[in-house]
């Protein structure tokens, strides 16, 4: 365990396309839009980039090397995907570690997602390669779509902890409201609790409105050294700690304990390495590709005692005026499916005081988590 | 409509599917530390013993969790909606999980801990799937 990377890297620029059912250009083209926006936002030029980490949904999503060539770079000193399973936080974690370790100086970290379209691949269905490996024990039973993996976990939170539709509805209603102040959001029209309660089941007890909307989107941040960050356009957002982690049986539905996710393993060293704890966070950016994932985010990272996340939501503690505001941009739940890169972008804007009508007052420290089930990655950020 | 996927048999899972054809639930077990291992692994994840052995188990389990599925996306299941996927904790060992469908019974009767009994669904001449019903 080490805190040697603490505050050695900082986020200095943000780029983010709209979340749209169709951005009407290629995935590479809109990825380059977001990357160039982030570089310009930082006050840098493309030639300053010497590291690229990124990934995206299967199909047309570009690779880091596609982006490198698209930007016209002569080469990079570091490239790669996400560390561990947290996607958005984990591409940023990879870039941050490379920058903090001196492998490169200034890196892009992006995630590109594409809305379903002909020929776009089927990343939602896990059994595409046939019923082999662990899929031999799942897809013959009609269990092959990721949300179906998660539904039985949520079922246990309801059965064992008494989580209710009203509590989850309070979360989703708040996300739609937050998204109404986010110009990138796909679902920015407020809904009522009744709308949530009448939304259809997709995999009981998971409802349609619990699920994020698959969209075209790229989110990108620029990460550089703390020294270089001081001279750039915006207030640096320092990366206090990064983590990925998982437990002893990372086989998705065969995980050994549905009462905690891989988040629990990420949390073990996150707080120690940051020198902070959950009580130090002014707000939290919890991944909510399925809304009830925030139950696990709240519990596994220690924001609430085990079994009390539903009550936390029911009491409105997640609202902008609550004890721990969550996802002021509307989360993936209402902004659109971005595997939590939207959370990374929003956390940065909030800590720079640039979140416009969504800006939380007097915020200095936050954490971001990504992943689900056996997958995890997280960051602690501060200004 | 795409066909329901059938398990691709290999060296590691052959015991399970062969057992199912004989209407037995067969799970790997470490002969050294006696840990049951599912899904199958080449080594015991607890003591690293290299030859886990196929073992006939009781066929009794409990509901660990479940979901009634209302959406498509799984080849061969669109005409079965709604169908129930069970996460079954086998009686042999805590957190020893297997997946199946509720073949007989009302999903509204499900709750965590409800006892289940294995049954077998012959899908083709070659493939029989272990499945589950409420134990009476």
Image (spheres, rainbow, N blue to C red):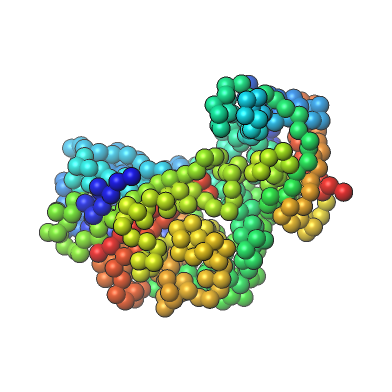
Relative to A68, residue A380 above or below: below
Whether residue A29 appears in this view of the structure is: no
The residue located at (54%, 46%) in the rendering is A124
Relative to A210, residue B81 above or below: above
Q: What percent of the width, then of the height, locates residue A20?
A: 43, 59
Residues A23 and A178: in front is A178
Judged from this view, the residue extending furthest toward the left is A231
The residue located at (28%, 62%) in the rendering is A382
Relative to A247, residue B44 above or below: above
Residues B72 and A243: in front is A243
Q: What percent of the width, then of the height, locates residue A295?
A: 53, 61
The residue located at (43%, 68%) in the rendering is A326
The residue located at (34%, 63%) in the rendering is A366
State the quadrant of the N terminus of chain A: top left
Q: Quadrant of residue A19?
A: bottom left
| A249 sits to left or right of B116 | left
Q: What percent of the width, then of the height, locates residue A288?
A: 49, 59
Judged from this view, the residue extending furthest toward the right is B136
| A47 sits to left or right of B126 | left
Q: What percent of the width, then of the height, locates residue A70?
A: 26, 43
| A327 sits to left or right of A362 | right
State the quadrant of the C terminus of chain A: bottom left
């Amino acid at each position: 365990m080490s805190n040697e990377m603490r505050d050695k890297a900082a986020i200095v620029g943000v780029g983010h396309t709209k979340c749209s059912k169709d951005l009407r250009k290629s995935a590479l083209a809109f990825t380059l839009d977001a990357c160039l926006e982030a570089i310009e936002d930082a006050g840098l030029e493309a030639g300053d980039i010497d590291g690229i980490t990124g990934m995206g949904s299967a199909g047309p999503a570009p690779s880091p090397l596609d982006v490198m060539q698209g930007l016209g770079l002569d080469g990079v000193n570091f490239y790669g995907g996400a560390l561990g399973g947290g996607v958005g936080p984990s591409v940023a974690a990879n870039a941050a570690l490379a920058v903090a370790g001196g492998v490169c100086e200034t890196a892009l970290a992006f995630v590109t997602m594409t809305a379903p379209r002909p020929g776009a691949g089927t990343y939602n269905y896990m059994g595409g390669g046939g019923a082999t490996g662990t899929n031999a024990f799942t897809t013959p039973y009609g269990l092959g779509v990721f949300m179906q993996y998660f539904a039985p976990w949520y079922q246990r939170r309801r059965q064992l902890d008494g989580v209710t539709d009203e509590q989850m509805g309070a979360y989703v209603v708040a996300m739609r409201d937050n998204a109404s102040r986010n110009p990138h959001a796909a679902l920015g029209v407020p809904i009522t609790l009744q709308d949530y309660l009448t939304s259809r089941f997709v995999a009981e007890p998971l409802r349609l409105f619990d699920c994020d909307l698959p969209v075209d989107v790229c989110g990108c941040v620029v990460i550089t050294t703390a020294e270089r960050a001081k001279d750039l356009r915006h207030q640096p957002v320092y990366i206090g700690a990064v983590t990925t982690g998982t437990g002893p049986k990372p086989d998705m539905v065969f995980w050994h304990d549905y009462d905690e996710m891989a988040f629990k393993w990420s949390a073990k060293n996150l707080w120690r390495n940051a020198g902070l704890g959950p009580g130090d966070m002014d707000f939290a950016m919890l991944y909510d590709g399925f809304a009830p994932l925030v139950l696990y985010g709240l519990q596994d990272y220690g924001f609430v005692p085990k079994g009390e996340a539903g009550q936390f939501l029911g009491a409105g503690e997640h609202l902008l005026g609550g004890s721990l505001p969550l996802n002021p941009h509307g989360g993936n739940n209402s902004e659109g499916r971005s595997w939590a890169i939207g959370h990374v972008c929003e956390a940065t804007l909030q800590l720079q005081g640039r979140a416009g009508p969504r800006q939380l007052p007097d915020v200095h420290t936050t954490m971001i988590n990504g992943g689900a089930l056996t997958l995890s990655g997280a960051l602690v950020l501060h200004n | 409509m795409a066909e329901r996927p059938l398990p691709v048999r290999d060296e590691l899972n052959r015991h399970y599917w062969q057992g199912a054809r004989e209407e037995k639930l067969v799970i790997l077990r470490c002969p050294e530390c006696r840990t049951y291992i599912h899904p199958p692994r080449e080594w015991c994840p607890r003591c690293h013993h290299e030859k886990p052995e196929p073992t006939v188990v009781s066929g009794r389990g409990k509901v660990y969790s479940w979901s009634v599925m209302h959406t498509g996306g799984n080849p061969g299941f669109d005409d079965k909606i709604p169908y129930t996927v069970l996460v079954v904790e086998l009686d042999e060992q805590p957190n020893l999980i297997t997946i199946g469908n509720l073949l007989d019974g009302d999903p509204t009767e499900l709750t965590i801990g409800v006892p289940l009994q294995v049954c077998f669904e012959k899908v083709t001449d070659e493939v029989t799937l272990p499945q589950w019903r409420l134990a009476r």
